[in-house]
Amino acid sequence: MVDIRNKAEDGRNIVESIVRLVPGFRGYHQKEDRRETDKILREHLAAKLDRLRASLNPIIRGLTDAGDLDLTGRTDIVRKLLEKITYRLRYASYGYAGFFDAIKVDQEDLDRLYEFDAALLDRIQALEHGLAQLGAMTGEAERFKEMLRPIQDAVSEFDTHLDTRRSLIERDEKHVDSR
């Protein structure tokens, strides 16, 4: 029977050998880890946004059943915008080119993107809180409208925030190209 631990150690020894022999490989390996971390974080955030979007479905059904088409339409706008930002976040650029690619993004840029993405969690938690309260207001049209407006604004700001992320990446890529 093959000892898997030995295989893992052999693989680690190969990586350690490469790290010693290839200048810059250690940084590349760290960047690859950061790239994967960025992807995992964004997927986690996108899944949370998916759940928020899905939480609006029964609210919209209830509003439709009650015949409140105005609130149904307004709430559906929020749902569609959540769907849009979920897609944008899930498929956002990694902000990092591979080791042998022409464009390189340095460690500070990666750290800044990671912090930017991590700050998105705060925005999602605020939306979770707002949507939970909104669900409790379905029988009270005026209060529902009052609560829906700041949620719609927060979702729009989230979308704008993602534009900022994209411009950070594009600026960093242009900055790197000019070096």
Image (cartoon, rainbow, N blue to C red):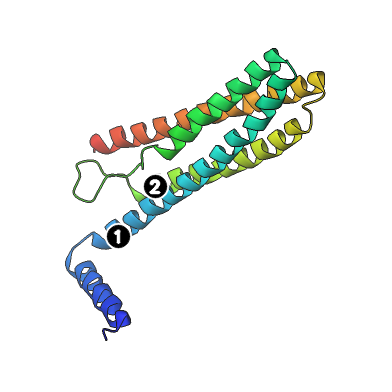
Of 81 and 172, the residue lying toward us: 81
Locate residue 79: give its quadrant.
top right
Q: x%, y% of residue 156?
A: 57, 24
- Image height check: is 5 above or below 152? below
Q: x%, y% of residue 114?
A: 46, 47
- Image height check: is 34 above or below 91? below
The amino acid on which the numbered mark 1 sits, given as a three-letter code, is His
Q: Is residue 138 left or right of residue 5?
A: right
Q: Label 2: few (<14), some or many (≥20) within 10 Å?
A: many
Residue holding disc 1: 29
User: Quick one: SS at disc 1?
Assistant: helix
Report the number of discs. Answer: 2
Q: x%, y% of residue 166?
A: 41, 32
Residue at x-position 66% and y-position 19%: 72
Which residue appears farthest toward the bottom when viewing the image?
Answer: 1
Q: Earlier in the sequence, mark 1 or mark 2?
A: 1
- Image height check: is 132 above or below 3? above
Q: Is residue 1 left or right of residue 165?
A: left
Q: Looking at the image, can residue 161 be seen? A: no
The amino acid on which the numbered mark 2 sits, given as a three-letter code, is Leu
Residue holding disc 2: 110
Residue at x-position 81% and y-position 18%: 142
Of 66 and 172, the residue lying toward us: 66
Locate residue 135: give its quadrant.
top right
Q: Label 1: few (<14), some or many (≥20) within 10 Å?
A: some
| Residue 56: numbered disc | none
- Image height check: is 36 above or below 82? below
Indicate the quadrant containing the N terminus: top left, top right, bottom left or bottom right: bottom left
Q: Is residue 91 left or right of residue 179?
A: right
Q: Is residue 95 left or right of residue 164?
A: left
